[in-house]
Image (cartoon, rainbow, N blue to C red):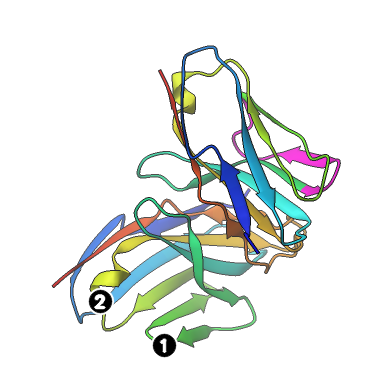
């Protein structure tokens, strides 16, 4: 089955700097890659996603890039702010998988003033 | 819309006790999922359902059971609770099981088994 690895497990950045989280996946049939943000004690919420027919997608300060050949995708957060502090999860899914996601283990991002 | 709701928010069980975690969604979603999240870990799929009357095992189904008698409800049953089942449980739903549909999560149930 699909296996998703996520790095780093923790990331500390100064406010205003950029943060990058990388995920690799094993199954070349995966074609949908969402990113979820989970604030402390809260539920995961989708922040951005990318499909396999697109190489990059941007939404204000966050962007996701996908390299299908290398089977990895990354989340980029620019101009980080304290409210970006959270755990971020990547996931991968494929057609005919009944919408099941394989999640990465998560990255704890801490933005320090 | 309330979205995905879960009850209870917190629960402490003794070893060997049983309980049902409730999950309801009002978005008319066909697909529903149960995950567990252990401290510092990602989300592991326990069971999922593609519609009323249809359920299937996920990655970590042992010790759990589910049912789906209606589109709205997807309860998770724990029989003979064990300390290894201490975790936060999230229910999620999506409109269909297409590979590119957002999953909406409930607020979670924090379960401790002592």
Q: Is residue A32 visible?
A: yes
Identified at 51% across, 84% down, the residue is: A57
Q: Quadrant of residue A99?
A: bottom right
Q: Nearer the viewer, residue A26 or A88?
A: A88
- Percent coordinates x, y for residue A31 in the rendering: 65, 69
Relative to A46, A87 lies left or right: left
> Who's the residue at 64% across and 38% down the image?
B22
Above or below for B53 versus A35: above
Q: Nearer the viewer, residue B46 or B112?
A: B112
Would residue A18 appear left or right of A105 to someone viewing this image? Answer: left
Question: Could you tell whether B1 is left or right of B85 in the image?
Answer: right
Q: Which residues are magenta?
A: B50-62
Please report the residue visible at 45 percent of the width from the left and 48 percent of the height from the top.
B42
- Name the secondary structure under disc 1: loop
B51 is within the stretch colored magenta: yes
Distance from the alpha carbon under mark 2 to that under mark 1: 13 Å
**Quadrant in the rendering for residue A39:** bottom left
Subunit that carries the residue with mark 1: A
Which residue is at the far top? B16
Q: Where is mark 2, residue-wise?
A: A81
Name the element at disc 2.
loop
Chain label for disc 2: A
Q: Image quadrant for the C terminus of chain A?
A: bottom left
Quarter-of-image position of residue A75? bottom left
Whether residue A27 appears in this view of the structure is: no
Q: In the image, residue B63 lies at what x, y percent?
A: 61, 23
Q: Nearer the viewer, residue A89 or B76?
A: B76
Q: Is residue B60 above or below residue B18?
A: below
Residue A15 picture location, percent across and down = 18, 77
- Residue denoted by label 1: A60
């Amino acid at each position: 089955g699909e296996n998703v690895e996520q790095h780093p497990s923790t990331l500390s950045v100064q406010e205003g700097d950029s943060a990058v989280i990388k995920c690799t996946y094993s199954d070349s049939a995966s074609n949908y890659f969402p990113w979820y943000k989970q604030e402390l004690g809260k539920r995961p919420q989708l922040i951005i996603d990318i499909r396999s027919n697109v190489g990059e997608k941007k939404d204000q300060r966050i962007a996701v890039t996908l390299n299908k050949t290398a089977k990895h995708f990354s989340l980029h957060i620019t101009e980080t702010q304290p409210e970006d502090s959270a755990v971020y999860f990547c996931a991968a899914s494929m057609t005919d998988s009944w919408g099941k996601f394989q999640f990465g283990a998560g990255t704890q991002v801490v933005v320090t003033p | 819309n309330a979205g995905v709701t879960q009850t209870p928010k917190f629960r402490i069980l003794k070893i060997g006790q049983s309980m049902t975690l409730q999950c309801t969604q009002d978005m008319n979603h066909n697909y529903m999922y149960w995950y567990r999240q252990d401290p510092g870990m990602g989300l592991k799929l326990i069971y999922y359902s593609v519609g009323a009357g249809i359920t299937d095992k996920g990655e970590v189904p042992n010790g759990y059971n589910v049912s789906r008698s209606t589109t709205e409800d997807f309860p998770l049953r724990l029989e003979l609770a064990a300390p290894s089942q201490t975790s936060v449980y999230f229910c999620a739903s999506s409109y269909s099981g297409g590979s590119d549909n957002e999953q909406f999560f409930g607020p979670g149930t924090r379960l401790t088994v002592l």
